Structures are given as C-alpha cells and as structure tokens.
Image: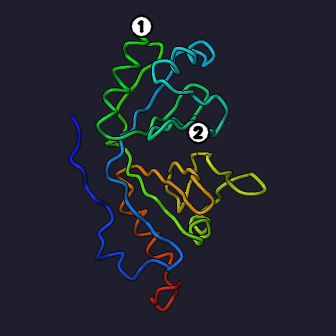
Amino acid sequence: MKLEAHAVIHEAALLGACREDVSIVERDSDGCVLLTSAVEAEKIIEVLSRALTMNIPTAPGTVSEEGDRTVSWLSPRSWLVHTAADEADDVIEAVGRAFPERRVHASSYGDHMCWFDIKGKGAEDLLRQGGFLSLERAGLPVNAIKRTLVAGIPLLIRRCAENVWQVGVERSRADYFVGWMTETQRDNSGRVVG
C-alpha cells in the first residue's frame, strides 16, 4: 500500500519567510528503495550492479548516478536508491529476481521519507545553523551523502552541487523541519532575515 502524496510545505507559510539567497522546494515525485544485504557487500555487489544496471557505491558516503537514478551508500550493507516514483517497483522486482534467496532485500522507502531541495548561496549556512554537517575540512564534498542531525532531526543530506542540497526527512518529522527552516530565518523581532 502506498500513501497519498502529502505536501509538507504550505506555500502561504513560506511566502516571505525565505531568505533571498535560499530556496526550499519539496520534491513530490520521488521513489526510494532501501536495499539491505544479509552478507558482505563484496559477495553481492557485482550481481546487484547488474540488476540495477549501474554501479553500486562501495565507499562510505558516496553516490552513483545513472540518468535520473541515484544509489547512495548508507552503510557497508545498505544503500538507498532514489528514482522516479513509477520506477521504484521495477527496482524492487529487479532485486527480487537477482536475489531469489533474499541475500539482498529491497523495500519501498518512498512513503517513509519527505525530500527537499535546498538551493542558493545561503543554503549551507542555513543547514549549519541546525548542526554539524561534516568532518571534512572543506565541508561535505559535492556528490556525497551522510546521515546527520539538523535541528535535532535525523535526516539524510546530500550535497548535489556547490549550492544545491537534497535533504530527506522522516515524514513524521517533516513539518517540524520545515517550521525550523522558516523560523531560523527570522531574527528576534519576528522580521525576516535575508
């Protein structure tokens, strides 16, 4: 069963609340599939790559892209496939055919997450106000992903380009995250900072 799409960002709430150097857009047509392996990655990575017709990342925090599909490394035995919503079932079926003994399990993850694109020169500063983004001296590298806390909210954060971030938040915490982003951009007098 799939949930009906539910917009978290209410445009009226964000009108005038965003800094001029940041745009926040909720993604509404994404499909996500969580892949988990019961065995070491090196034992399944070649078959999994063939099943998805793309390279599967094997290094921490890395992302592979092929067309509109990305595969992100989450742990030594788990990956997140980000694809068009209508292709998520195809990914699940392909993994099922490649691993009938269930050494790798694919499950729909799209209903669980709410995704946002955060863009602009001020995007990194906005995210840093909520927490620690990376141990790297230069910050989170482009095309890297990690799990972290921002404003006390667990999320997945991917740096797609210098000033482009993709953020995945558990659907149950998405309203709080959007509220935090909006309020963080205001000063103590209630005026919008930007």
Q: Nearer the viewer, residue 5 or 68?
A: 68
Q: Which colour assignment does the render follow?
A: rainbow
Residue 101: assigned label = 1
Residue 124 percent location from the top left of the image:
61, 65
Residue 109 percent location from the top left of the image:
37, 37
Question: Residue at image x 58%, y 34%?
Answer: 73
Q: Quadrant of residue 94?
A: top left
Q: Quadrant of residue 99?
A: top left
Residue 55 percent location from the top left of the image:
57, 27
Neighbor class of circle 2 (other Cα within 10 Å; few <14, some 14-19, many 20+) is: many
> Does 24 appear above or below 138?
below
Closer mark to the observer between disc 2 and disc 1: 2
Question: Residue at image x 53%, y 84%?
Answer: 194
Label 2 to label 1: alpha-carbon separation: 27 Å
Residue 63: assigned label = 2
Say which amino acid is labelled 2. Answer: Val
Residue 154 percent location from the top left of the image:
50, 51
Q: Residue furthest front?
A: 67
Kind of element beneath mark 2: strand
Question: Residue at image x 46%, y 27%?
Answer: 35
Question: Residue at image x 21%, y 34%?
Answer: 1
Disc with the residue nearer the chain's start (2 vs 1): 2
> Does 172 appear above or below 85?
below
Q: Nearer the viewer, residue 27 or 153?
A: 27
Q: Is residue 109 left or right of residue 163?
A: left
